């Protein structure tokens, strides 16, 4: 059975199983045969996840799941042994981690935190950079979403914060605005790159936006009385 009805994220692993992060009950595993769920409850033994609120699950390298939790930092789960450990390679990183993204082209792991800014951690060298509100182009230390949009030479990193959307400029190691009146300042709650490499963003107050991959054109959709035209039913997109 599922540990909780509130589902935060779903991620397939390299074995074909599906991992489900919940809002208050840790992680669930649905095996690829689809026969049953396994609940990995929160706890402190070697086979329990440390946090209850699992916001993101990724598998940067085969065999190890990285899980961002809102109450126990980043947890690592070994798929073969089932052992879980709390990741502590960055001293002082906060316990409220909202987002993880792995860039396979640079071997960098991006870690978005609530009120603790953004980290870029290199899995090869162990070196990391902490980006905070102020000198790096960010105007908020609360990171709610990170997306990687494929480009000709890798991926472009997009960061959604409580105060606007930014993209990473590797030439200056800073973040830049896109000069859009709404997206530069609104709460960007979620992001998704579709099969055509378009970037979609859900905002707290202004509905849904899309940045086209081919020409950068920005389109938006929001609540309207004209529901026949396909308008949204709510401007709060999570």
Image (cartoon, rainbow, N blue to C red):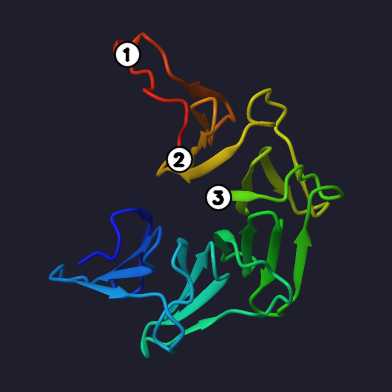
- Name the residue at 43% across, 18% down: 223
Q: Vertically, is 214 above or below 103?
A: above
**Which one is earlier in the sequence, the residue at label 3 or at label 2?**
3
Q: Circle 3 — which element?
A: strand
Which circle's residue, 3 or 1, is located before the other in the chain?
A: 3
Q: Which residue is mark 1?
A: 227
Considering every residue shown, the one lying at the far left of the view is 35
Q: Secondary structure at mark 2?
A: loop
Assign a secondary structure to mark 1. helix
User: Which sits in the foreground, 178 or 154?
Assistant: 178
Residue drawn at 49 percent across, 27 percent down: 207
Name the residue beneath numbered marker 3.
147
Picture layout, residue 210 above or below residue 105:
above
Which residue reaches farthest top?
A: 226
Q: Quadrant of the N terminus?
A: bottom left
How far across and down, in percent of the image, does residue 173 sit? 80, 55
Would you identify the image quadrant in which residue 116 lies? bottom right
- Density class for disc 2 (Cα within 10 Å; few <14, some 14-19, many ≥20) is few
Q: Are marks 3 and 2 in contact (CB under 8 Å)?
A: no
**Marks 1 and 2, the one that precedes in the sequence:** 1
Residue nearest the observer in this picture, 62 or 162: 162
Image quarter where the C terminus lies is top left
Task: Measure how far apart labels 3 and 2 are at the Cα level.
Answer: 15 Å
> Disc 2 designates what residue?
238
Mark 3 or mark 1, whichever is nearer to me = 1
Position of residue 51 measured from the top left corner of the image (x, y, whole percent): 48, 71
């Amino acid at each position: 059975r599922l540990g909780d009805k509130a589902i935060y994220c779903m991620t397939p692993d390299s074995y074909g199983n599906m991992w489900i992060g919940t809002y208050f009950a840790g992680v669930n595993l649905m095996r690829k045969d689809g026969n049953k769920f396994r609940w990995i409850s929160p706890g402190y033994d070697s086979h329990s996840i440390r946090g209850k609120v699992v916001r993101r699950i990724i598998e940067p390298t085969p065999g190890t799941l990285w899980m961002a939790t809102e109450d126990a930092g980043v947890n690592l789960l070994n798929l073969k042994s089932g052992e879980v450990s709390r990741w502590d390679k960055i001293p002082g990183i906060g316990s409220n981690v909202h987002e993880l993204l792995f860039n396979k082209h640079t071997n960098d792991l991006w870690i978005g935190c609530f009120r603790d800014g953004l980290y870029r951690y290199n899995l090869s060298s162990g070196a990391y950079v902490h980006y905070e509100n102020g000198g790096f182009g960010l105007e908020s230390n609360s990171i709610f979403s990170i997306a990687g949009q494929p480009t000709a030479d890798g991926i472009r990193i997009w960061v959604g914060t409580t105060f606007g959307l930014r993209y990473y400029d590797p030439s200056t190691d800073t973040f830049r605005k896109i000069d859009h009146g709404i997206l530069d300042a609104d709460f960007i709650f979620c992001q998704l790159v579709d099969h055509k490499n378009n970037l979609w963003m859900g905002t707290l107050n202004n509905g849904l936006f899309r940045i086209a991959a081919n020409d950068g054109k920005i389109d938006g959709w929001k609540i309207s009385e004209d529901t026949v035209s396909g308008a949204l039913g709510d401007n709060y997109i999570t």
